Image (spheres, grey):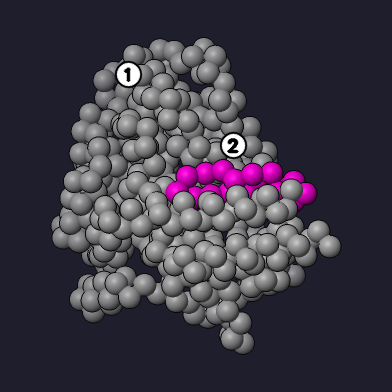
Amino acid sequence: MIPSVLPTYNRAPLAFVKGAGSWLETADGRRYLDMGAGIAVNALGHAAPELVAALTEQAQNLWHVSNLYQIPQQQALADALVEHSFADTVFFTNSGTEAAELAIKMARKYWAAKGEDRVEIITFDGAFHGRSTGAISAVPHSEKMVKGFGPMLPGFTQLPWGDHDALNAAVNDKTAAILIEPIQGEGGIRPVPDQCLKGLRDLCDSTGALLIFDEVQCGMGRTGRLFAHEWAGVTPDIMMVAKGIGGGFPLGAILATENAASGMTAGTHGSTYGGNPLGCAVGAKVMEIVSDPAFLDQVNAKAGFLRQKLEGLVASHPDTFEGVRGVGLMLGLKCKRAPTDLVDAAYQQNLLTVPAADNVLRLLPALNISEADLSEAVNRLDAAATQLES
């Protein structure tokens, strides 16, 4: 008999009833150190007092009115995002997947409004842009994502990761946009080198194609800059954000330049819940905190501390780990065995981690995690690796 919850997840045999900071607790009182943060969602940890206060205050006043009306909380968050980014305008969604759908639509609408038949969008192996039909069509080579869900939507060209010749050959007068994660998350914590992001910007500038960055996982302070692309000194035309922007409350957004968004006029897109007062009140508080240069300095300091600890861990377990990759507090341990083995062993040490492709174990802690908790996490990883090797 099928369970009442559709069985599409291979869930761990764990259920948590409360959390505080970087710790979660089960009903029987077991405490787990969380180095996954809900897959990079809980940017400020669990039950962050500032976010609880923001949500509670808003909940006592107004939850939902729909986008038929002005929403002051939405306007305030949009203004903050525009102030701290390349963007001129913002559309709010409930998730990264919804943001991906709008990014695709916006790029194609841009060209349609100009009367040009440019609909092809270039993506890359290892990418993950969500699980809607449009988002999985963007990565048709991913059998896990697309098998059994065909036919895929046309208009996408997926290229090998890092193949510059293939990229240059693929861009033509039908290319609407290039869509890429500055750091692949699900794909195994693979950063795109700064020079490659600059090259993509130059290529788009020379061909007119729009450049779309998917910063759903790597954005909102995760890398030690507010947005990951800032390290390369380039800007996109369109950008997807979600996960950390709500600090645990479902929220996503598309940020865009005025030019890229020029085709999106009244009636061309909408959302019932997107930009609701509750989500935007929380998002505004997250934005206030993570956009503070002093906060980002602390993220960078903790990232350096954690990376040094992890390098020592790799050196201590050469039969289990190959190396460390990633930027900021978006780090991965390249493993010599299935990362799920490490995930399971870490459960035995009351530690939560996240697997990824390319035999990578992801570490995505809260951005305000303490150095003491980071040290404890590495100690527990050390114990997990020792357990597997025995």
Secondary structure of residue under mark 2: loop
Q: Which residues are magenta?
A: 319-340
Q: Disc 1 versus disc 2: distance between alpha carbons? A: 25 Å
Q: Amino acid at mark 1?
A: Asp
Secondary structure of the residue carrying tag 1 is helix
Image point (70%, 54%), residue name: 316
Residue 79 horizontal side relative to residue 333, left or right: left
**Residue holding disc 1:** 205
Where residue 89 sits, quadrant-wise, is top left
Residue shown at 74% from the left, 48% from the top: 318
Which numbered dot is residue 126?
2
Please, what is the three-letter code of the amino acid marked with disc 2?
Gly
Q: Residue at x 64, y 67 (%)?
A: 380
Residue 138 position in % (x across, y down): 52, 34
Picture disc at residue 305? none
Determine the residue located farthest toward the bottom in the rendered image: 28
